[in-house]
Amino acid sequence: MKYNLLVTSFFILISVSAFSQSTTDQPELDSDRPNFTQGAAIVPHKTIQLETGVEFKNDQTLSIQEKTFLYPTTLIRIGILKNAEFRINFDFEKDRQKFKSGSGLLGQDEIVQGFDNVHLGAKIALIKGKGALPDISILGNIMLPVGIKELRPPHAAPEGRLLLNNKLSEKLELQYNVGYRKLMDHEEYQGEMLYSISTNLKVNDILKIFAEYEATKVLRESVDSSLDGGFMFQILPNLQLDVYAGAAVSEAAPDFYTGGGITWRIPR
C-alpha cells in the first residue's frame, strides 16, 4: 500500500510540474483501463501512455477456491503514427488454489506466480465516426511464449478485435468490441470468441463512470460472462485514477473481481 501511494504521488508531482511548463494543447486523455472493452481512440503521435494497476479475482466451486492477484497488470501505448499506436502488455500474476474438504486433496494448496499475458501489438484507427457511424479501429496482438511455463502459451498466440465507439451525446459514449484469440486454457491451446459492450458517462470534468458486459466463449464450453462497473477520476489533464468491481453472470466466470489503477500520459 505504501508503495502504491508513493508511485501515485510521484506521477502527480511529475505531471503537475510538466503541465505547468507546457503550453502545447493535448487531446483529451483516453484510457483503455479499467474495462475489458477497448476504445477506438489512438494515443497522440509521439506520445507514450502508461496504464497500470492491480486486480483481485475470487472464484469458488464445490471443491476449490481460487484467488488470483495481478500486481501489476500493465499496458504501455506508444503513438507511432497519427492513426496507429504500438502496444506492450504484461502482467505479474499470483494464482492460489485452496482445496476444500471432500475434494480428496485437502491441505494440498497450490500457488503459481510469475509473469503472464505478455503481448506485443498495435491499434490502428480506420474510420472517424459521424452521426450514427461509429469510430472504428482494429486491434491486433500476439501473446508471446514467455513468462512462467504454467501460464504461458506453448507458442505465439494471436488475437484480433474490431473496436467501435458511438458518441451518443457530449457526455455519453458507447463502446463495443468483437474479436477472436488463441489462448492457453486447461492445458490446451484453443480458440476463443470475445465480445463486450460498455457505456461511459462523463459526470463532470473530473469524474466518469462506466458499466460493462463482457463475455468469452471457447468452442464446446460454457460462456464466461460477467458484469462490471467503476469510476474514473481525471485529476490532471494527463493523469487518471480508476477503481472498479465486477461479478459473474455465468457459472464459468469468476465469482467476483475488483481492482484499481492509474493512467499517465507522459508529457513530451
Image (spheres, helix red, strand yellow):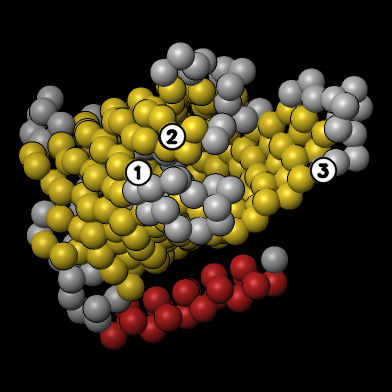
Pointer 2 and pointer 1: residues touching (CB < 8 Å)? yes
Q: Residue at x 85, y 25 (%)?
A: 103
Q: Residues within 10 Å of mark 1 (few under 14, many from 20)?
A: many
Q: Which image quadrant: the C terminus?
A: bottom left
Name the disc covering residue 157, or none: 1
Secondary structure, mark 1, is strand
Using the rendered view, name the quadrant where residue 132 is placed.
Answer: top left
Label drawn at residue 109: 3
Mark closer to the chain start, 3 or 2: 3
**Mark 2 secondary-structure assignment:** strand
Looking at the rendered structure, which numbered label has been put on residue 91? none
Q: Residues within 10 Å of mark 2 (few under 14, many from 20)?
A: some
Q: Quadrant of the N terminus?
A: bottom right
Where 246 falls versus 90 (above or below)? above
Find numbered disc 3 in the image and state the secondary structure of the residue it sits on: loop
Residue in front for this viewpoint, 100 or 77: 100
Q: Sequence-wise, which precedes: disc 2 or disc 1?
A: 1
**Amino acid under disc 3:** Asp
Q: CA distance from mark 2 to mark 1?
A: 9 Å
Residue under circle 2? Answer: 189
Location of residue 120 (image quadrant):
bottom left
Measure the C-alpha gap from mark 1 to mark 3: 30 Å
Asked whether residue 29 is in view, the answer is no
